[in-house]
Image: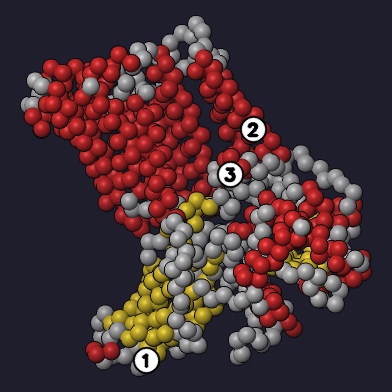
Amino acid sequence: MKKFLLLLSVFITSFLSQAQVLEPVKWSTSVEKISDTEYELISKATIEKGWHLYSQTVPEDGPIATTFTYDDSEGNFKISGNTSEEEGHTVDDPVFGMKIKFFEKSATFKQKVSIEGDVKTINAFVEFMVCDDTRCLPPTEVDLVFNVSNEPKTAITEVKQQNTEDAAVNTGNTEDNPAEKGLWSIFFIAFFSGFAALLTPCVFPMIPMTVSFFTKQSKTKAAGIRNAIIYGVSIIVIYVLLGILVSLIFGADALNALSTNVWFNIAFFILLLIFAASFLGAFEIMLPNKWANKVDSQADRGGLIGIFFMALALAIVSFSCTGPIVGTLLVQAAAGGSQTGPIVGMLGFSLAIALPFALFAAFPGWLNSLPKSGGWLNTVKVVLGFLELALAFKFLSNADLVLQAHLLEREVFIAIWIAIFGALAFYLFGKIQLPHDSPVTYISVGRLSLGLVVLSFTIYMIPGLWGAPLNLISAFPPPQHYSESPYGVGYTKVGSSAATASHDALPDGAHLMAPHDILAFNDYDKGLAYAKQVGKPVMIDFTGHACVNCRKMENNVWIKPHILDILKNDVVLISLYVDDKRPLAEGDVVESKLNPGKKLKYIGQKWSELQTIKYKANTQPMYVLMDHNEENLIDPVAYTPDVDAYHNWLKTGVSNFK
């Protein structure tokens, strides 16, 4: 009964999510007159909630980018510059191992043109790809028509794309905005980084000095509390102003470019190396002493201005310890692509710094509960230095991925992190001494515990050299396919399956899908012919090179032994990539049945049309089990992260064939 209910839920989900051709993006066009000869062509995408449209600037090996093509073949207008787009959202995608920009709800694209003749309309088309949390649609082409007129009254004309209906926006989706999630992540990381900065030699000893100042200057307890609050607010204002300054200097467009710009990522790598070296004791990063002296003289004025300059003096004096942390936070926040990221980061950091200073200044008796300063403060600083060093290689990896230079592949990255955290573990156990360290006569329980955690983390990463997924740090190293060997270092294929045994004599059109070693076809006819030859059912995998959830299924579900055994031995897998941009052979170019008058140009279009016509669906992933007469053995399913449900679906389909 339990099995029946499980299968029933899978079938219902499959029916509701797949038995329809989805069109989550609707396009409209308008034209804005700039001058007598210049116009701006505006394309607006209205996107249903829960779906996202990818940017025009997507790194290589990422999802399909949005692309506009304008028909200027008659030579009566010229295109000026590139098509501009909105800010959008930029996220660090753990599946693709890169930062990817996308749009939600709506997106507007603008292109300037110069008219040189009598032009009434300009034709264009847009190619794009959209995904939600469980599926992706194949690359889609939509024709755009821009009505151009020289009459001032019609300088702006709204034109709906032909043969489409207005988008029905689904208001039932209450999913959080990814940009908001990103800002909250930045805030909390910065907040905890602020507490870490408190435990450094430049900041921690300043707490009793500050308390002493407010105790002497405040005549009453109420005045002391008021001055302490003003002091805390002043700290927050100073750091938030720094975040605003960074945002204004870079601007939204530049911040979005940071994620995939090679030189920005290399510059950040070098910057974090300098910060790490400073924390490890090679040198100190300090602001000029005259700045501190001038600010300190202003602090003696008393009143609100004096308190503000006291907060500024704290920021300057403690810069050698807080500077690298602040710099790292600003780099991380800026690289997130949001113009408000640096401001949010500095708000979180300054709040963590300001709270203890303000509270201890308001309630000086709490000082008795603070631990005494000592060598442990430098230990905190060194630990932060190791973390800065590890983070630096993430930015170098970003640059390498964009260049596709393969200089810092997955195994090399993991090996570097093993070395860094291994050295940190030895340091915590007292086996390594660095400048400014106090002699270690014994190891405290806290330091020993932290050392054991770091050592455990180091050991955890070692299997990553042999292809382990390392889910705890999946957002940091390059993806598994970006490696010296997709099977892992030193891996030798073993197994008794027919696919593995016949590695040197594969059937026509077949290949072994790494890293699972599943015998797979990318051609429908060849795969079906082989299935008839060996007497096995066919499993069609409608997938895409840029399909995130397809990779999740392959990496998290297919890898399970009982599922992998079925895929290797009990079915013939045919993977049809709907975003395959290779051109069709000349004899295979036919007219589209879905869009009469258009030719199918690419292999992916052929498979996408097959899926849409035969299965009335156009989302990926989609899995079909069928017999040799091309009849379904069981209802198709889509993205099914539940391993048991997917296994039962496979078993039932194979049983129906037998």
Relative to 430, 44 lies left or right: left
Q: Marks 2/3: CA distance?
A: 13 Å
Q: Residue at x 85, y 77 (%)?
A: 629
| Amino acid beneath label 1 | Val
Callout in the foreground (3, 1): 3
Callout in the foreground (1, 2): 2
Q: Earlier in the sequence, mark 2 or mark 3?
A: 2
Evaluate whether residue 257 shows in this view: no
| Amino acid beneath label 3 | Ser
Q: Residue at x 55, y 29 (%)?
A: 420
Evaluate whether residue 472 shows in this view: yes
Relative to 60, 76 lies left or right: left
Relative to 120, 163 lies left or right: right
Q: Earlier in the sequence, mark 3 or mark 1?
A: 1
Nearest the eye: 84 or 266: 84
Q: Which residue is mark 1?
A: 119
Residue 328 vertical placement versus 19 (above, below): above
Q: Which residue is mark 2?
A: 460
Q: Earlier in the sequence, mark 1 or mark 2?
A: 1
